[in-house]
Image (cartoon, coloured by chain):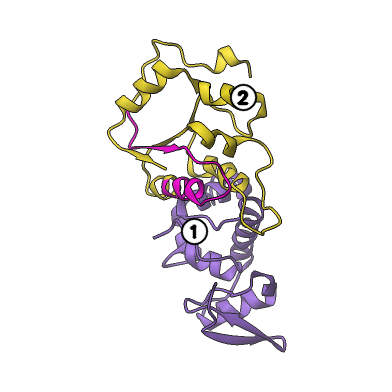
Amino acid sequence: MQDDEAALAADTPIAPLDLLVILRHPPHGSSWLREGVDVALVAAAFGQSVGLLFQGDGVFALVEGQRAGPLGQKGTHAQLAMLEMYDIERLWVSASALRARGLTPADLMLPVQLLEADALERLVHAQPHTLLF
Amino acid sequence: MTTMARTITVEGREIALDPEGYLVSLADWTPAVAEALASEEGRALSAAHWEVLTVLRDFYQRYEAAPAMRPLVKAVRQALGEEKGSSIYLMRLFPESPAKVGARLAGLPKPTNCL
């Protein structure tokens, strides 16, 4: 996927969802990321429309290969792969967070939509319910 | 850690169960364990049950989690077709709660996103 195709045009309207979950922690070192995705899965299991926004170090969760490590902790790869089974298909990523970490959409395990700062702000403002993890 | 509440004996092996009847160790599962758990509840497993249990085990293999009802319906629809991929069909096979009963019989943990 080309960067310019994935980016949300400045005038694209962003419809409100039942819930937006913002993920800002890396996939390892704490359970923040897993907990955030769990909340999204629970809401989706109850038929709510849910979107995920990956910001900051949260973008690392989408990098290929986040599987169980030597500690036997579950990785986030399987959990994120499961999102489609819960019909969670709206995945947004902060374009600047990705750039700052030297990543491109080609490094990510799922198709996502990149948001520049202005679109990101519009997305968050359009949501009545947002949870920050 | 899961705590053991009781055991059942299947083919001479003691199988540990947690307080809700799920396997303490997922590695203990065999088809005979599923049959034993089912008969304890007064269920007989037909071919139709088994194909759903297979879908559940494949789901766990792939996603490392037991599915709630909605994703279970979706997984069954993908694997077994439109007709079986409905909550009515699954409710008929596993009355009460297909996601919970199915996970238990398939040797998976209790689905966490299923309240």
Q: Position of residue B43 (x, y in %)?
A: 53, 76
Q: Position of residue A58 (x, y in %)?
A: 52, 37
Residue that badge 2 annotates: A105
Left or right: residue B67 versus residue B35 is: left
Left or right: residue A129 versus residue B10 is: left
User: B68 above or below A11?
Assistant: below
Q: Chain of mark 1?
A: B
Q: Position of residue A113 (x, y in %)?
A: 51, 23
- Does dot 1 land on a helix, a strand or a loop? helix
Colour assigned to chain B in the rendering is purple
> Closer to us: mark 2 or mark 1?
2
Colour assigned to chain A in the rendering is yellow
Categorize mark 2 by other alpha carbons within 10 Å: few (<14), some (14-19), many (20+): many
Quarter of image, res B9: bottom right
Residue that badge 1 annotates: B90
User: A125 above or below B111?
Assistant: above
Q: Quadrant of the N terminus of chain B?
A: bottom right
Left or right: residue A9 versus residue A61 is: left
Membership of A22 in magenta stretch: yes
The residues tagged by marks 2 and 1 sit, at their Cα atoms, a distance apart of 38 Å
Q: Quadrant of the C terminus of chain B?
A: bottom left
Looking at the rendering, the stretch of residues picked out in magenta corresponds to A16-39
Q: Position of residue A126 (x, y in %)?
A: 31, 25
Q: Are marks 2 and 1 on the same chain?
A: no
Q: Which amino acid type is marked by label 2?
A: Pro
